[in-house]
Image (tube, rainbow, N blue to C red):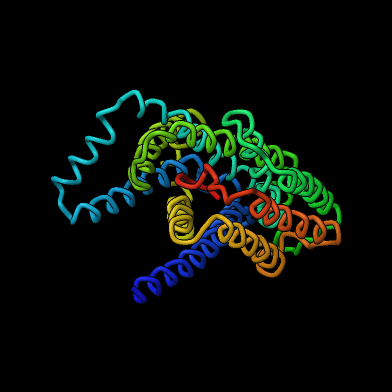
Amino acid sequence: MASTVDYQKRLKVLSLVFLTVQTTALVLLMRYTRLPSPTNPVESLYLTSTAVFCSEVMKVVFCFCAVFIQNEQSLESTREELERELFSAPKELLKLGIPAGLYTIQNNLLYVALSNLDAATYQITYQLKILTTAMFMVLMLHKKITPAQWLSLVILIVGVAFVQLAPSANTPSDSAAQALKEQNSWLGLIAVILASLSSGFAGVFFEKLMKYTKPSIWIRNIQLGFWGAILAFAGVFLTDGKTVMRDGFFRGYNFLVVFVIILQSVGGLLIAVVIKYADNILKVFSTSISIILSCLASYYVLGDFEPNWYFAIGTLAVIGATVLYSLGGQKTPQQPELPVTVTKS
């Protein structure tokens, strides 16, 4: 009995550490790989639409391997479970196309955001997904929001507003000068807001859809990844079709780009594991640590922003609001975005 408890404690700690590292590394590497330079201009950067497609495919592969292991490495048992869960209820599978499509749009928007915002500003502003999730939970699921949670949402908005005032004082390093020439901070901000809306609606819609069905984490992600891959592939040719035909599907790919795709594909799975072995409050603290690490890395490593008092106050307000929202409920809610992607963070 004691060994089981110790095992679960180790899993809790490991899952939180991995989630914090994954969240921080994903944001920083997405930002870094989207920074143009004299030797790597915008025209030679990888196509983000292809990266989104590859991450969806990889997510399905990871989840298939997990189902295979759960079925004692039996291909026959795995095939039977997949047929039962994926094809026995085609209407339910069809409904999942809505959240899958929204998550695909969200992932594309996050690349747009990180192409136009530094990692620290992006990380903090993207916490607006707490506000949008709460809003859709009230509208679609008729959930009760406590006074403490409403207060946290007000603090969140104020904190994000302060962060958006900070760039006027930024004095980035010379190495980031080329990137700033290509940036459009307003476009980045709009992309984050739209991604937050997409995340909130898709997460709540997914929770409502899954209310009376209990497939495993891995099956859920295969279902979403199935539609996500199809829609992302269509998006590749709708947005970058001519470029793909001219330069190839994997234009600009290197080791770091592949690593970004891997990190993006495992993000939602890590969150689900954290909720299973830890809880949502600990996930919030993991997010807070990730925000701090992203700010430090943006300043010391990427050198693409310099914080000021506006930024510091806004960061503390957003972190405080995130913790207060999680602690402010009468019971610990599980965020509806958990079993899915990231981005996503």
Classify residue 255 by image quadrant.
bottom left
Classify residue 111 by image quadrant.
top right
x%, y% of residue 12? 46, 66
Left or right of 180: which side holds 113?
Answer: left
Of 180 and 154, which appears nearest the observer? 154
Left or right of 172: which side holds 201?
Answer: left
Reply above or below: 92 against 192.
above
x%, y% of residue 193? 68, 38
Q: Would residue 178 be seen by someone viewing this image from the given angle?
A: no
Residue at 43% across / 50% down in the picture? Answer: 265
x%, y% of residue 126? 66, 47
Of 318 and 260, which appears nearest the observer? 318
Of 218 and 24, which appears nearest the observer? 218
Left or right of 272: which side holds 153?
Answer: right
x%, y% of residue 270? 45, 56
Quarter of the image that includes the N terminus: bottom left
Residue at 61% across / 35% down in the picture? Answer: 143
Left or right of 312: which side holds 78?
Answer: left
Of 46 and 158, which appears nearest the observer? 158
Q: Would residue 324 be seen by someone viewing this image from the given angle?
A: yes
- The total number of labels drawn is 0
Reply above or below: 86 against 255.
above
Residue at 72% across / 66% down in the picture? Answer: 299
